[in-house]
Image (tube, grey):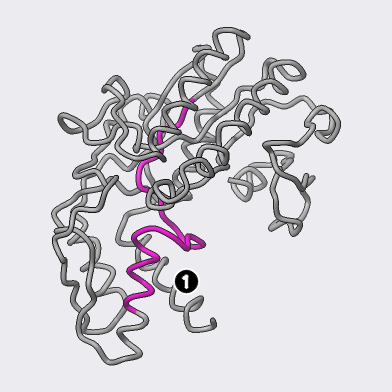
Amino acid sequence: MTSLLLSHGYEVITIDRSSSPLFTGIFSIVGNLNTLDLFSCVPVRNYSACFHFAGSSSVPASFDHPLKDFISIAPATLNLILFLSKRHPDCRLFVGSSAAVYGNPPSLPISETFPLAPISPYGIHKTLVENLCAHYSRLLCFPISILRIFSAYGAGQTKQLLWDTSKKLYEASLLGLDSIRMWGTGEETRDFIHATDVARAALCLAECQSNHLFDVLNVAGGTQVKIAELVEDLCLSWGYAISPIFGGEVRIGDPVQWCADISNLNKYGYMPSILLDDGLRDYVVWAKNILSNR
């Protein structure tokens, strides 16, 4: 998100727990957004948008540590809302949510009007934050957009399916194995979107300036992909004769099928720009480099 904003000529201010900014030419605030006194540390500017993508992103970890998962997102979101609504009431807040709020949808594709039925603590907490945003937006007359992001991926991601599979492929290639073991049946589906396209979608929405005080939009590729097909493509991109073997387990908190209806996002002029095959090849190049230099 930061690199895209900089490339479009925007002044960028970031808030991060890391003391080492990834980009030059930005004003970086170091601290925990849950407890930061934003009124004293955020410089006075004429802000047009705030992108809030902080928080955990692991469904399994949310089962192990549900309170930690909740604390990672809810207090920070409220802190931002109270600060922006008071100091910068015209600055729209874009909050990253997740398709996890839908759980196992009754049909596909999934539109924003579908009932929310999360099946994990992670999805429950995202749903709670969405409700918090909806009510505070109304209460304070403050503009908020919820972005329900589906299966985002891209270089730099060291968790979730692509990273776990890459680690297994790397170890298999070192040991001379011809297969890797995977969770599930492989028939599960997801709707993948490259991180670059997530950022593009967020910027597109910010620049279009919605007339709605509060709105919710799916952010996805709009295409259903079987996990088995994706993992096989990843194996081919890895360049070794390694095949996936799916154990058939059903992991708690994992939905069966996802495919997003992105027609509302398309109305703002947004279309995905990175094909999954291209994104996977780029991810493999990055993952190989990271894993081989550990």
The residue shown at (69%, 47%) is 16
Q: How crowded is mark 1: few (under 14 residues within 10 Å), some or many (20 or more)?
A: some
Instruction: Return the x and y of residue 200 as percentages of the image width and height.
Output: 49, 41
Q: Can residue 271 be seen in this view?
A: no
The location of residue 191, given as percent across then percent down, is: 28, 45
What residue is pinned by disc 1?
286
Q: Which amino acid does label 1 sit on?
A: Trp
As drawn, 172 above or below 219: below
Q: Give the range drawn in magenta.
A: 146-169
Residue 129 position (above or below residue 235): above
Q: Name the quarter where the C terminus is drawn.
A: bottom right
Taking depth in this image into account, of 281 and 77 the one nearest to the observer is 77
Where is residue 75 drawn, in percent x and y? 62, 31
Q: In the image, is 282 to the left or to the right of 71? A: left
Residue occupying the point 76% across, 56% down = 19
Viewer can see residue 250: yes
- Which quadrant would residue 73 be assigned to in this image? top right
Q: Is mark 1 on a helix, strand or loop?
A: helix
Residue drawn where x is 24% and y is 41% of the image: 258
Whether residue 128 is in magenta: the answer is no
Residue 168 vs 272, above or below: the answer is below
Q: Nearer the viewer, residue 35 or 90?
A: 35
Q: How many badges with numbers are in the image?
A: 1
